[in-house]
Image (tube, coloured by chain):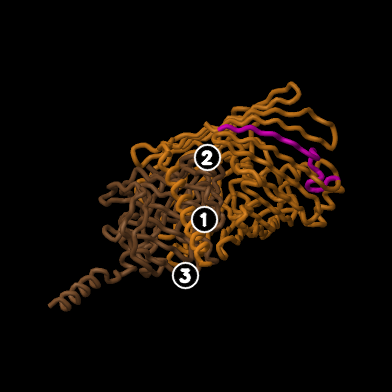
Amino acid sequence: MKPLLAVATLVVAALAHAAPDAQALLAASDAVRNPDKPFGLTTTLIEYRNGKQTDTSTLAVYSSADANSGQFRSLLRFIAPKRDADKLMLKSGNDLWFYDPASKATIRISPQQRLLGQAANGDVVTVNLAGDYSASVAAEEDVGDGDKQQRHAYKLELKAKTPDVTYHRIEMWIDAANKQPVKARFYAESGSLLKTAYYRRYQQQLGVNRPTETVIIDGLDPNWVTVMRFADYAWRDVPESWLQRDFLPRFKPQ
Amino acid sequence: MKSLPLALLLAAAVAHADGGDADALALADATADAQTATRDWRFLTELAGASAQYRFNDQPAEARLSLDGRIDRRFHDDWRFVFADRLDLRSTGGHQSSVNTLKELYLGWQPDTDLLLDLGRINTRYGAGFGYNPTDFFKVGALRSVTSVNPASLRENRLGSVMLRGQKLWDGGSLTAMYSPKLADSPSDDAFNPDWGASNPQDRWLLAVSQSFGNDHGGNLNPQLLLYHDADTTQLGLNWSVLLGDATIVYAEWAGGRQPSVAGRAAGIDDTAFRNAASTGLTWTAAAKVTLTLEYQYDGAALDDAGWSALRSGPLPAYVRYRQLAAQRQDLTTRHAAMLYAQWQDALIRHVDLSGFVRQDLIDDSRLSWLEARWHGDDTDIALQWQYDAGETRSNYGGLPQRQIWQALLSHYF
């Protein structure tokens, strides 16, 4: 009986550890970060260089997922610093428009140009990775989370489906128990590490336990750290017709 | 055994990386909440000192204090009140002067998600171009007080037009219609005059329609068509910009219609004919935080080579009248021009930006060069600007009274 029991135990164990559907896992972790209906939140970014706080900016973000692609389109309003207050940005994939209420100019900007702006990281919050990446399970392992606790996680390997994404490869650790994103590493096409992100300060927001803070460590300059905090989560009506260039001068968020 | 030191080294490297992450997380732990509340107003003061080198008749340096405020408030959910005003106080050689610019004052009403109506003085601006905007039809007469030749400054410090404006939105597109009536005959130099004569010198209307065509991400093709009408002209306009790769924007702006030339207007001659104006270029951004814009500008209503040569060698009053009208209309002085604009963010030092542009007149080879170094603090900017106008006598830029201008600025945002 003993060998049979051993085999049975092994089979059960193997079943228990059968690789989960990586794409579904990624989609589940997307759903932890991003609400499934149009919503708004406030993002505050605090930047550090060599341990010293250098920049702080705050943006109000209105987001709505595209019915077809599942990808988020966002209207962003700058709140701080004061010199950038009330400037607006519309982001829909690589379609980026910037509006300055002082000059009344609505101009198209390139993804590269956006990276130069204040709060370049500010819009990475609402990205559904499952739409743009193919995931596979690379490992199941314990990993240190943003609160310095060990979590049992699946390490997913994400490969970009199209070349027009900023990050060509991502390693993502997702808590095996509750599908919460724990940590991610973002890589360029060349293979160099661009960013490391820790998802932490989980709180109940819009019905789900969501990370309310992301700590981003620059891959090329690890002394460049950005702390992103998310607050004021609320369901917002973001009509499809607002997500266009010619609405920007008229957008006045609540 | 040889692999042991390597393994130790790798382990040390991994430990170091994790240590770096731990340091970053410790910084985040120690970060206090710093969220800024939304405000309905903004206010800017700017203190400037300018010294110019004149071609004739040297003039004393100028000191300027500018107060610039904006209130933009929603009320009763569907209503919006906007007020924007700027006051420039100048002192030159013991002589004080002031110019107030009532930029905007209007009420907005959004009776429905997809319908917006506004009434009042509104600064409405169109144009994909950077340094010249043929489709910015309401730019004519809008400049009341010029503090810098930087295109960004010229856009910010101008009068809106009194108008009724409505906009209907649909998925991926919109139609905007505006009507701006004549309110007065001529502009006013009075310091605190709302200057209806400058902003509303004649009845005008404008229709703008845009529609995006394209992919799942909202469409890279998003042209905007305009139809403008005033007593002198009816014009069609087009604005189009496209993303190439992830760092280049190519844009084109065009306007065309039957209209008098600038020289015809200046001389009081009706020489109405179909004339085009265009501005096209590209903006490229490098990972090193450098952005370059190269633009070609064409104005079919401005003088060509022969006409410009004749005007330059003719009587001075006609030359001055033409130049004043072209400046007042924010048209090109001559038919062809080019512009190169460059900006380098965090240039060598963090929070210090270098920017500059060159405007080249392609008819008379005169050139305007402008450079700025700007330091950004939390709420304060300090900037130094330099402008040089080079060219032969009575050329586009050689004909400007100043040869060189230095300006230092201290701006504070409240």
x and y, in percent, of residue A133 in the image: 41, 67
The amino acid on which the numbered mark 2 sits, given as a three-letter code, is: Lys
- Chain of the residue under label 3: A
The amino acid on which the numbered mark 1 sits, given as a three-letter code, is: Gly
- The one of B302 and A14 positioned closer to us in this rendering: A14
**Mark 1 residue crowding within 10 angstroms, few (<14) / some (14–19) / many (20+):** some
Relative placement, left or right, of A179 versus B401 is: left
**Considering the numbered disc 1 on the image, is that residue within a helix, a strand or a loop?**
loop
- Chain of the residue under label 2: A
x and y, in percent, of residue B403 in the image: 81, 40
Report which colour depicts chain B. orange
* In the rendered image, residues at marks 1 and 3 fall on the same chain: yes
- The one of B218 and A132 positioned closer to us in this rendering: A132
Identity of the residue drawn at 65% across and 40% down: B374
Location of mark 1 (residue) = A219
| Nearest to viewer (mark 1 / mark 3) | 1
Chain letter, brown in picture: A
Residue at far left of view: A1
Mark 1 or mark 3: name the one nearer the start of the chain: 3
Q: Which residues are magenta?
A: B393-412
| Nearest to viewer (mark 3 / mark 2) | 2
**Considering the numbered disc 2 on the image, is that residue within a helix, a strand or a loop?**
strand
x and y, in percent, of residue B177 in the image: 48, 51
The amino acid on which the numbered mark 3 sits, given as a three-letter code, is: Thr
Identity of the residue drawn at 18% across and 75% down: A8
Location of mark 2 (residue) = A52
Mark 3 or mark 2: name the one nearer the start of the chain: 2
x and y, in percent, of residue B55 in the image: 84, 37
Q: Is A172 placed above or below A79 here? A: below
Assess whether residue B85 is covered by the magenta stretch.
no
